[in-house]
Amino acid sequence: MPLKDIDLNTVTYFDLNNQVNIPKDNQIQLAKDDQALAAFLKENVEPNVKHFPSLEERFEWLFDNDFLERGFIEQYSMDFIKKLYQFLEDQHFQFGSFMSAFKFYNQYALKTNDGQYYVETYLDRVAMNALFYADGNEELAMTLADEMIHQRYQPATPSFLNAGRARRGELVSCFVLQAEDNMNSIGRLVNSALQLSKMGGGVGINLSNIREAGAPVMGIDNSAGGIVPIMKLLEDSFTFSSQVGARQGAGVVYLSVFHPDVMTFLATKKENADEKVRVKTLSLGLTVPDKFYELTKNNEKMALFSPDDVEKVYGVPFNYVDITAEYDQMVANPNIRKQWLPARNLEEEISKLQQESGYPYIINLDTVNRANPVAGKVISSNLCSEILQVETPSKIDDEQEYQELGSDISCNLGSINIVNMMETPDFGHSVDAMIRALTYVSDTSNLKVVPSVEHGNQENHAVGLGAMGLAAFFAQNQMYYGDAEALDFTSVFFMTLNYYSLKASMNIAKERKSTFHDFDKSAYADGSYFDKYVNRDWSPNTDKVAALFEGHHIPNQKDWVELRDQVKQYGLYNSYRHAIAPTGSISYVNNTTASLLPIVNRVEERQEGMIGKVYYPAPGLNNETMPYFISAYDVDMRKVIDVYAAAQEHVDQGMSLTLFMRSTLPEGLYSWKNGRTDKMTTRDLSILRNYAFHKGIKSLYYIRTFTDDNQEAGVNECESCSI
């Protein structure tokens, strides 16, 4: 029966899946999910996969009907492709849950143009990814096939979905741009937002360089419109540029907390904001230097500085001035116009808006730049707050051409499934293949439509290898989220990952005799980046974690000394290697928990379009693991911050760290609530933001609130650059 003719009233898999949510004898009916999976494959998939007499004929049909690109397949002999397919079949891959199979076949599998039949299985999609990223290298293709069929490595949605397809979008996940304080740059920015949104992932845009509303333009007072009109232009651009109707474009605007328009900026997200200024779909983020935390702590007034004046005094755009270092001089300088605001008023406003809408994201800018090993300054982030790379400004002339070509950011992402990665026979070999796959996307991305992004990609070869399934690993190994063993495991895992990714990037640089731009000015080149590894033993502190890593080589201080010397000699090919992105639908395909976060529910309820509710039991849920699967809404968010801080020590970029709160907080969860109201307040959010800052967290994504009427409020997680 063709897909479009399937009668949802007669198939059994939805009913079976729904029974997962109906306890029987006070037990979750987990077996019903296995039955739903089997029924889905039998009733939906098997009758509707288009079959071919041979592999050769399958490929010819896919080429002739414009489903696959011919070029990447013809890099290999058909004998090798058959060998790769035989290897994949021999692994006997099985989906881990009904949701895993359902998500893959609904969102990722190629279908005939009329939507009636599947023209690829999971095995086919893995094969196409492996062959595509290996670029003719048979050994690498086999390794990547091994990594993906065992679900140790998962390319991000744009990459996994589009690899090898003839009709596809770009493989890149996200972009970061900045605007300069002139009409030419703003015009180019709007065009770039349109083009990048059409191509692929979400776009992060920093507007801190733009002069504030009411500032003089060409000597005429009160002429500048400020940032809000530009935000409205960008929101309309993302709405218009919808990737051929596939989905609406998405973007985030970042602004410095020391920008005079900051209060107006935050007000654009308020529910009662005037329609002339309210932004509905655009996300908001703040870049926050250390000085803000100091002024807030001391209950002082803060100066908001005119970006135009700052640029005139310092000779560089506002974004590139170290406000924490220069604050007192800027306050004392009569040539810099400034407005004044009690720092705690702004702190309160941030918390109010986070409570109401989930925004703004927070980038702890000085924390980011202290840890940044690459020459230059990080000034902004992307739509999910995990991409943190250096940028340089561009100068645009009256013909909208680049008078001086700066560098902006693109990033392609992938994620390690931690549960499965701990079963790899060779940690280093696995990571090497993953870094090479991501590097291939960087090397082959066509981003010429926005020259500054193309330039940044060509110079930096930046990638973002992340991870998911941490909470599943904790529970399946009977560790409570955020306890001493969990923190120990997180530290050792990400230290080990960092080591092997550095080694992979060094080997690529050695093979190609090429490094990223300005490698010689980096903390890698002078060896200082490695000091913390050379001078400290990062091996497990607990017996349990030592046992979990048995069979894996954990890098020791001697290994780090040797790697430091190799990196100094040969360089690194990739300026950035890691970023912990949010994982959306692809974590379901992998049957694991999202990113590094706790679960939301032991049995998650999802509304799947016109189909209705689908239920997903936590991966590995059983009577033994159930006590360790605790809802994020019932976890002290300081434990989440602690886990992320343990990983952040070894992650060169950032992490999408979401905070989960209840409108009514569980008794005893937060000690400062004792004797006070049990309702979530702005004070709670302020305490948690400051805790994250003091723990060295680079960025906070958004706030999700579980309300008293059993609803989730806050940001709708972006699909654009979630993995």
Image (spheres, rainbow, N blue to C red):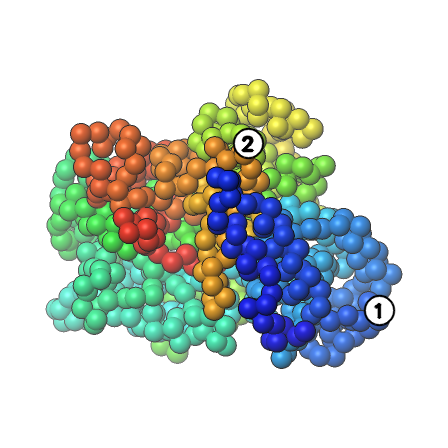
| CA separation in Å, label 1 and label 2 | 46 Å
**x%, y% of residue 482?**
44, 31
Q: Secondary structure at mark 1?
A: loop
Q: Secondary structure at mark 2?
A: loop
Q: Amino acid type of disc 2?
A: Glu
Query: Which residue is drawn at the image coordinates 43% and 37% (left, top)?
Result: 630
Q: Amino acid type of disc 1?
A: Ser
| Label 2 neighbour load within 10 Å: few <14, some 14-19, many 20+ | few
Instruction: Name the residue beneath numbered marker 1.
Output: 54
Q: Does residue 73 appear anywhere in the picture?
A: yes
Query: Which residue is drawn at the image coordinates 71% and 58% (left, top)?
Result: 123
Left or right, residue 580 beside residue 419: left
Instruction: Name the residue beneath numbered marker 2.
Output: 624
Left or right, residue 211 beside residue 282: left
**x%, y% of residue 166?**
66, 73
Q: Quadrant of the N terminus?
A: bottom right
Query: Which residue is drawn at the image coordinates 82% and 73% (left, top)?
Result: 57
Whether 110 is drawn above or below 490: the answer is below
**x%, y% of residue 607?**
45, 60
Q: Out of 285 and 669, give the one closest to the viewer.
A: 669
| Label 1 neighbour load within 10 Å: few <14, some 14-19, many 20+ | few
Count of numbered circles in the view = 2
Q: Out of 68 and 532, give the one closest to the viewer.
A: 68
